[in-house]
Amino acid sequence: MSQAQLMDGTGLARRIVDETAKRAADLTERTGVAPCLATVLVGEDPASVTYVRMKQNRSRKAGIESRHVALPAGTTTDELIGTLTELSADPTVHGILLQHPMGHHIDERAAFEAIAPEKDVDGVTLASFSAMSFGLPGFASCTPGGIMRLLDEYDVDPAGKRAVVVGRSAILGKPVGMLLLGRDATVTYCHSRTADLSAAVREADIVVAAVGRPRLIRGEDIKPGAVVVDAGYNPGNIGDVDFDSARERASLITPVPGGVGPMTIATLLAQTVEAATRQAGA
């Protein structure tokens, strides 16, 4: 069997950002509304600071205004909720991104729930998860939304396929499983308590690795011809899938980096412009 085709998230993300920039310019021309994304960061975690700066740069390229709110590491849950409530009520802000991690002293779920659903362009609230689960209008969690767009780009129809999601986080594993289920895949969730993970993976037509453990998924466990989406990112640009061995058996595979990562940010920007369009009634 020949090597798997790479799923190029970088190229697709670039196209999405270009389309998003055109939509943003059109919205501003028609209504005078300039889409605005507010980013909120608690503390100065170096990785988070870098990630937020990258999102701000990409926002500008997409014609989206960026407002950054930097809060000290000692910020309390109530103080953070106050900031998010103010941004939710601000008509000039159309999307809100609360960067995590936020520190163990903060009630993360309470903070997320302070974001108005119509501005939850990162798809982190209970309202957004419900919308994803029930197929209702709303905003998808950005990485799962990006994964679905990537599957569509490569004509992967989940209907009738067995999909195995390795990981059950609230903003990646759980929602991507619900989105796949909504597209008529038969979905199995695997996690740290799963007995015989290899056996489950071997049954999968679509594997989504989202657990944060380097090279956990081995090529020998990939069903020949399966589609492999590696949403893991570990130090050293290593994914959750052993790329070299998996590529020998899969039909399609995402590289790390250059696969899922760029799609996450592109989805965030596209959803910000969509939020601005809805809020402008345009």
Image: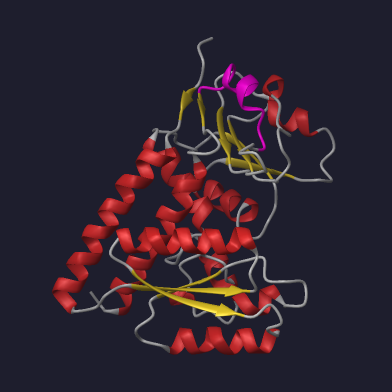
Q: Position of residue 48 (x, y in %)?
A: 59, 62
- Magenta highlight on residue 178: no
In the image, residue 203 above or below residue 126 = above
Viewer-nearest residue: 1 or 244? 244
The percent position of residue 263, horizontal first and vertical second, equals 45, 48
Q: How is the image coloured?
A: secondary structure
Residue 137: where, in percent of width, then height? 42, 66
Query: Is 255 in front, or is 201?
Result: 255
Q: Is any atom of residue 133 visible in this view? A: no
Q: Residue at x 47, y 84 (%)?
A: 88
Which image quarter holds the N terminus? top right
Above or below, comparing residue 165 to residue 251 in the picture: below
Residue positioned 36% across, 71% down in the render = 275
Identify whether 15 is placed above or below 120. above
Picture quarter containing residue 156? Answer: top left
At x 58%, y 29%, the residue is: 205
The total of numbered circles placed on residues is 0
* Residue 9 shows in this picture: yes
Q: Residue 39 in the image: state x and y as whole percent.
A: 49, 72
174 on left or right of 83: right
Question: Which span of residues is magenta-colored?
Answer: 240-251
Q: Residue at x 71, y 33 (%)?
A: 215
> Where, by quadrant of the figure, is residue 267 drawn?
bottom left
Q: Quadrant of the C terminus?
A: bottom left
Q: Residue furthest left?
A: 30
Which residue is the extreme one toward the top?
1
Above or below 108: residue 5 = above
Quadrant housing residue 62:
bottom left
The residue closer to the viewer here, 174 or 217, is: 217
**Residue 202 relative to residue 89: left or right:** right
